[in-house]
Image (spheres, rainbow, N blue to C red):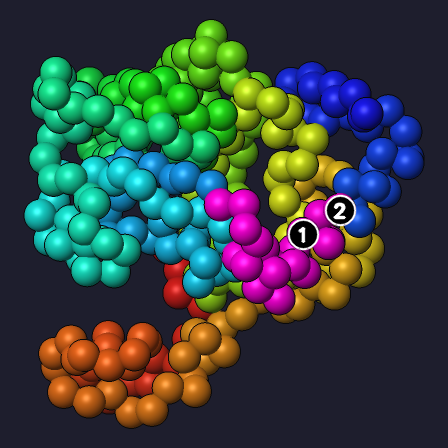
Amino acid sequence: MKTLKSRNMKYEPESKLDDQWLVREEQRVYECRMDGKLGRKRKRFKLIDAFAGAGGMTLGFSKSFGHAFDSVWVNDFNDYCVETYNANFGRHCLPGDIVDILNDPALKIPKADVVIGGPPCQGFSLLNKKREGDPRKQLWRPYFQIVERSGAKVFVMENVPQLLGSFEHGEIMGTAEAMGFKVWGSVLGAADYGVPQTRRRAIIIGCKFLDPAAVFPPRKTHFDPSKGGAQTSFLQTDGNGYLPGALRWRTVRDAISDLPPPIGTEIRHEAPPLDLHFGRPSDNRNPLDSLLVAA
């Protein structure tokens, strides 16, 4: 069995053999997910999504993206988000203030394998000029109450990059480690993993049975064509590594140019994505001419 060492959240392989094994294993898992083999496995994992919004993170963990997770409990404060989530993933998203919900003695959080979620980011965002003392900075605390009460062995937290290095980040790390988690965190770029958007987000991952620094950050599947390709760093284990066969960043045209012209201005009862493919007033510009959507 391999011994995993972590120092300053960076994995240090014991040998080149370990390094090569991790590369092969990550490639194999990625190929199984892309082929749909992971989603067809009999072994399923229970998922909780806190601060779920309309369900973007749940979707990423779903069978639609090749994974074997089933959502069992969800919460969001916004009623429109709750209705959107329930319409797409089943009616188990609970509306309301998460603090009030967790203080309800009648509430039972179901057991889960993984808790995901993005506590509100406004308290850390540079767009918030009054972010000092913003009470939303403390909403990571009920997030960890959910992790503890569900018995989850893994958590994934998403937020704006400014979270990392903040005072609250230190508290999050300390709380997670006190609960028995080994923790990894960094800023990842969505375009590096096939999303036609240059959105950068802080990702914090905790695990009780493995040091996540051994396998994170995941090797990139796409590269920035303006920087000359990815061929020089396929086997690196740092944040610059790529999986074999990495492709150039995807553009908006790559993602949606195969859709037919939009019809009407309302959601339709058709198979996705045509149900959400409706028009709006145009300023005569072609949105597909954009290379990427900047966040």
Tag 1 and tag 2, C-beta contact below 8 Å: yes
As displayed, is residue 292 above or below residue 191? Answer: below
Q: Position of residue 136 (x, y in %)?
A: 20, 26
As displayed, is residue 138 above or below residue 193? Answer: above
**Residue at image coords 75%, 22%:** 4
**Residue at image coords 41%, 79%:** 256
**Residue at image coords 33%, 53%:** 56
Q: Position of residue 210 (x, y in %)?
A: 63, 25
Q: Mark on residue 25? A: 2
Q: Mark on residue 29? A: 1
Task: Tell me where the magenta segment starts and ends, as one range.
Answer: 25-44
Q: Residues within 10 Å of mark 1 (few under 14, many from 20)?
A: few
For badge 1, the amino acid type reads Val
Q: Position of residue 261 (x, y in %)?
A: 29, 92
**Residue at image coords 11%, 40%:** 95
Q: Position of residue 130 (x, y in %)?
A: 17, 28
- Is 37 a magenta residue? yes
In the visual, does 174 lie left or right of 132?
right
For badge 2, the amino acid type reads Glu
Q: Secondary structure at mark 1?
A: helix
